[in-house]
Image (cartoon, rainbow, N blue to C red):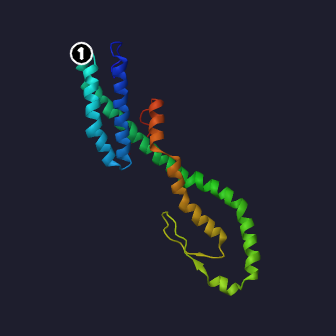
Amino acid sequence: MIASSKVTDQAQERWDLIVERFRTACILHKKSESRDSRRIIKDELPVLIKAWIQILPASLRNDAKADLRDMFEREQALVDQSCKMQQVFKETLVKKIIPELEAKIAAKYRALYVNQYERKREAIDSEAAARSWINPSFSGDSGRKRIEIGNIAGMIDALQDGEAEELANTLVDLDDIVGTMNEQGMGPLLSDS
């Protein structure tokens, strides 16, 4: 909004609410929650904008449309950049950080599991165990895998692969990224290409 000592606290508070609700609508749209986004755009914002313009000093009302247009562009760019950053963070988490952490943790326990399994397997008929297969299902790019029941390391790896994407989604929240970028006054960080 135009920086002016003539702008009242009440007008500034309404402006801040307009910005916050528009940003929320943009975030909801990016999260494919179009219904809630449209409700804000069509139902809430017109009422807020009208109330804001009515309490603006007359000398600033002419600039209100330009202020709104600039804010809409700025907030959309902020949310777009945040989405790009979220995707980069998620890809880094899924492809590098989470697998490395899981590998370190799994390495500590893999030997224990294998040793315990080997002791139990010696007590079971080896031929029956060799013919037993399980079909764990998990989400991930690789789809369903068949893992031999004796392949403990393979079972652990399959579970880790499927959980990495879900974990990344919970760690990298779009609302948090947008808020942080806004608080820090950050502009575009990633290219559109």
Relative vertical location of residue 51 with respect to residue 59 in this rendering, above or below: below
Q: Residue furthest top?
A: 5
Which residue is at the front of the view, 157 or 9?
A: 9
Q: Position of residue 193 (x, y in %)?
A: 38, 45
The quadrant in which the N terminus is found is top left
**Badge 1 amino acid:** Ala
Callout 1: SS: helix
User: What residue is shown with label 1?
Assistant: 58
Residue depicted at x 29% and y 34% = 45
Is residue 116 toward the left or the right of residue 130 in the image?
A: right
Mark 1: few/some/many CA within 10 Å (<14, 14-19, 20+): few
Residue depicted at x 26% and y 17% = 60
Question: For residue 7, which quarter of the picture?
Answer: top left
Which residue is at the front of the view, 187 or 61?
A: 61
Relative vertical location of residue 138 with respect to residue 45 in this rendering, above or below: below
Residue depicted at x 45% and y 41% = 175
Residue depicted at x 62% and y 69% = 154
Which residue is at the front of the view, 3 or 154?
A: 3
Q: Is residue 66 visible?
A: no
Relative vertical location of residue 129 with respect to residue 154 in this rendering, above or below: below
